[in-house]
Amino acid sequence: MKTESKIQKENVAILLKLIKQNPKLKIVPMVDSEIVADDCFSSWLGSFGESEIDYIWDNGERIYFKSIHEEELIQDILEDIPQEISDSIAEKTAIETVGKYEWEKVIVVWIGLP
């Protein structure tokens, strides 16, 4: 069984490898809400989780991850397309629309509970 320390070191090693391979990409740390569930303190302890390359899109209200939210975004657009439009045209339109969002390629670092 791996210790927390060993898992942490492996996760950091993967992050460093991604940084070395993609030095121009922005690093986006995503902090689990369980870590900062209250405002009683100014600092909280977290743990380096997995790191990966993904695409993000910020619509001004929240951040979307292409690997996680792309299908959801397509479905949201499909709901707004009139029923008179054929399914194939509606789906093509929704996919093209989401594809035109200003997706930014980044290194995502998931920060979780220790």
Image (spheres, helix red, strand yellow):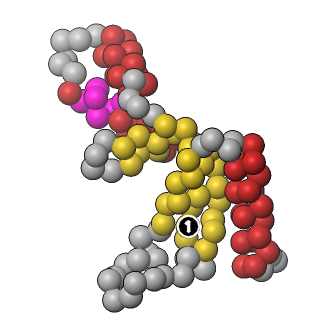
Residue that appears at 56% across and 61% down: 110
Q: Position of residue 8 (x, y in %)?
A: 72, 72
Camera-nearest residue between 55 and 22 = 22
- How many numbered marks are there? 1
| 10 lies left or right of 87 | right
Q: Which residue is mark 1?
A: 111
Query: Looking at the rendering, which quadrant does residue 34 occupy?
Result: bottom left
| 25 lies left or right of 35 | right
Residue that appears at 33% across and 50% down: 62
Query: Looking at the rendering, which quadrant does residue 5 occupy?
Result: bottom right
The answer to whether residue 104 is above or below residue 100 is: below
Q: Which residues are magenta?
A: 74-79
Q: Does residue 91 show up magenta in the picture?
A: no
Q: Position of residue 36 (x, y in %)?
A: 41, 77
| 96 lies left or right of 68 | left
**Extreme-front residue of the structure:** 24
Would residue 87 be seen by someone viewing this image from the given angle? Answer: no
Label 1 element class:
strand
Q: Position of residue 65 (x, y in %)?
A: 47, 44
Would residue 106 be seen by someone viewing this image from the given angle? Answer: yes
Q: Does residue 76 show up magenta in the picture?
A: yes
Residue that appears at 78% across and 65% down: 10
The amino acid marked with disc number 1 is: Ile
Magenta stretch secondary structure, dominant: helix
Q: Which quarter shows the C terminus?
A: bottom right
Q: Which quarter shows the N terminus?
A: bottom right
